Amino acid sequence: MADKNLELEKLKFLIEDYRQKVQYLKDHFARIWTRFNFFLTLQSALFGATIISIEKYQWRVPAFGIFISALWYIAGAQDRYLVALYRKEIQLAVPQIKQALQLSNYYYIGQTEDIPGEAERVKDLNIENTICQWRSRSASTTKLAAMIPLVLLLIWGAIFIVTLCSR
């Protein structure tokens, strides 16, 4: 009886742990896109300021754009790392729950790729790739949180150099 109670408590723990991991990932996504929107708004304002800035101060706007883009890139890269970490924690929790509940044909929340050694294959779900619906590992949505500011950093650098050379 004690073993059965222990197994039941272990299962309850695993399920609650899984639930919390999923919630934490979900909350992190909300934080990522809040930050993304903040930085995107700031970048838009900076591009507008570049167009209307007084000539003698014109170099300061792209310099500030470089600074903001660098901060945004750092935040985006850190966010992307945390997304990968939280997804991995969820992925590693699933086999224990599957075994305890004797589940088969179970896809965990957020599973976007096949897992070596697991029978469940994402490709078996037959999700179509179309012009309006597709996924790329190299340009996934969460990677955009770091890729876009990196591109903007390069653009601001070019604007900064052009502005200095035209003085």
Image (tube, rainbow, N blue to C red):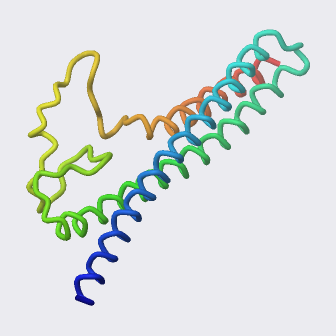
Residue found farthest to the bottom? 2
Left or right placement of residue 86 versus residue 121 in this view: right
85 or 104: nearer the viewer: 104
- Residue 65 vs 49, above or below: the answer is below
Instruction: Estimate the x, y position of residue 9 in percent, counting from the top left.
Output: 34, 76
Q: On the image, which quarter does residue 56 sit in? A: top right
Instruction: Estimate the x, y position of residue 7 in percent, counting from the top left.
Output: 26, 79
- Residue 108 vs 14, above or below: the answer is above
Q: How many marks?
A: 0
Left or right placement of residue 87 versus residue 103 in this view: right
The residue lying at 33 percent from left, 39 percent from top is 138
Residue found farthest to the top? 52
The quadrant of the image that shows the N terminus is: bottom left
Left or right placement of residue 74 versus residue 47 in this view: left
- Residue 117 vs 55, above or below: the answer is below
The quadrant of the image that shows the C terminus is: top right
The residue lying at 63 percent from left, 26 percent from top is 40
The residue lying at 45 percent from left, 58 percent from top is 20
Left or right placement of residue 55 versus residue 90 in this view: right
The residue lying at 29 percent from left, 34 percent from top is 136
Residue found farthest to the front? 1
45 or 25: nearer the viewer: 25
60 or 146: nearer the viewer: 146
Instruction: Estimate the x, y position of residue 4 in percent, counting from the top left.
Output: 23, 82
Instruction: Estimate the x, y position of residue 64 in percent, counting from the top left.
Output: 78, 33
